[in-house]
């Protein structure tokens, strides 16, 4: 009888030590799966946003609309009816607008404003969303294969680089999205680590924006996910609405 009690006590002690670690690993697997799905969704949505930008003169609004549409799957809660999809779109739309109030969800990495000024041309042109032609400054996009490949020196990310008109017509964008962590307890630990609460890690600007989201829903914790995409412009780039930095 004493042997049974001793064995039971030993097993309980081992469970107390190993149990939390086991459950932390198990919950970590679940959270990782959720994060992988969210990142894959953002990657696809980012490509769709870049594609929309290439077709709409690198304007931000068409890109944001494509990003919102691309992120809808994260908000579908099992209800795939028309109402359910409309609610999912509404939530994606509201989420993007809330993030954009603090920092644009889409940043055009290239072409920059300096690149645009270096290669711009003034001509009569009808943009995708215009009703008629008008005189405006554009980054030429026609007959790129036959244009001269002379390079010009421009500053990109603080470094002088030599690029040509073909390089200037590569649209590179960066996106971010605040994803709500799902797993209880573990989400608080992850949020603390990535926000600089442990190990002296400095939170990114995007993460600082996402941290403000936790005050919207009490107990919510968010992680900033980011993605990049590169596409060839299918329409001339214009400088409009502060799209070029």
Image (cartoon, rainbow, N blue to C red):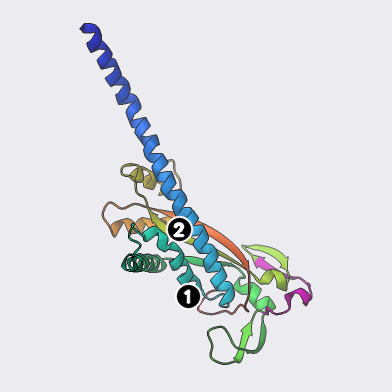
- In the displayed structure, would residue 219 be above or below residue 149? above
User: Which residue corresponds to the image point at 61% horizontal and 71% vertical from the top-left?
Assistant: 112
Question: In screen coordinates, is 205 left or right of 152?
Answer: left
Mark 2 packing: few (<14 Cα in 10 Å), some, or many (20+)? Answer: few
Asked if residue 153 is among those painted magenta in the image, a careful observer would answer: yes
Residue for point 47% across, 57% down: 41
**Camera-side residue: 233 or 80?**
80
* Residue at figure coordinates x 34%, y 45% from the top left: 183
Residue 205's tag is: 2
Q: Tag 2 or tag 1, which sits nearer the N-term?
A: 1
Residue 180 is left or right of residue 243, and the answer is left
Q: Residues within 10 Å of mark 1 (few under 14, many from 20)?
A: some
Tag nearer the camera, 1 or 2: 1
Q: Which residues are magenta?
A: 140-155
> In the image, is 46 to the left or to the right of 213?
right
Q: Position of residue 164 (x, y in %)?
A: 73, 71
Distance CA(mark 1)–CA(mark 2): 22 Å
Which residue is nearer to you in this view: 137 or 198?
Answer: 137
- Which of these two is toward me, 41 or 200? 41
Looking at the image, which residue sits at the far top?
Answer: 2
């Amino acid at each position: 009888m004493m042997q049974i009690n001793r064995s039971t006590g030993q097993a309980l002690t081992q469970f107390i030590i190993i149990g939390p670690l086991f459950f932390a690993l198990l919950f970590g697997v679940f959270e990782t799966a959720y994060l992988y799905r969210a990142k894959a969704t953002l990657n696809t949505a980012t490509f769709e946003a870049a594609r929309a930008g290439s077709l709409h003169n690198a304007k931000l609004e068409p890109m944001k609309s494509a990003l919102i549409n691309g992120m809808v799957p994260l908000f579908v809660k099992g209800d795939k009816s028309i109402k359910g999809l409309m609610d999912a779109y509404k939530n994606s739309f509201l989420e993007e607008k809330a993030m954009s109030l603090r920092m644009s969800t889409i940043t055009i990495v290239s072409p920059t404003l300096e690149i645009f000024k270096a290669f711009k041309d003034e001509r009569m042109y009808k943009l995708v969303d215009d009703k008629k032609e008008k005189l405006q400054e554009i980054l030429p996009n026609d007959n790129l294969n036959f244009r001269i490949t002379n390079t010009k020196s421009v500053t990109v990310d603080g470094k002088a680089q030599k690029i040509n008109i073909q390089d200037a017509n590569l649209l590179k964008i960066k996106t971010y999205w605040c994803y709500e962590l799902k797993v209880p307890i573990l989400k608080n630990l992850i949020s603390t680590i990535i926000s600089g609460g442990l190990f002296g890690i400095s939170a990114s600007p995007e993460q600082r924006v996402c941290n403000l989201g936790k005050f919207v829903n009490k107990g919510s914790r968010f992680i900033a996910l980011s993605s990049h995409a590169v596409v060839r412009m299918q329409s001339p780039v214009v400088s409009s609405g502060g799209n070029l930095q």
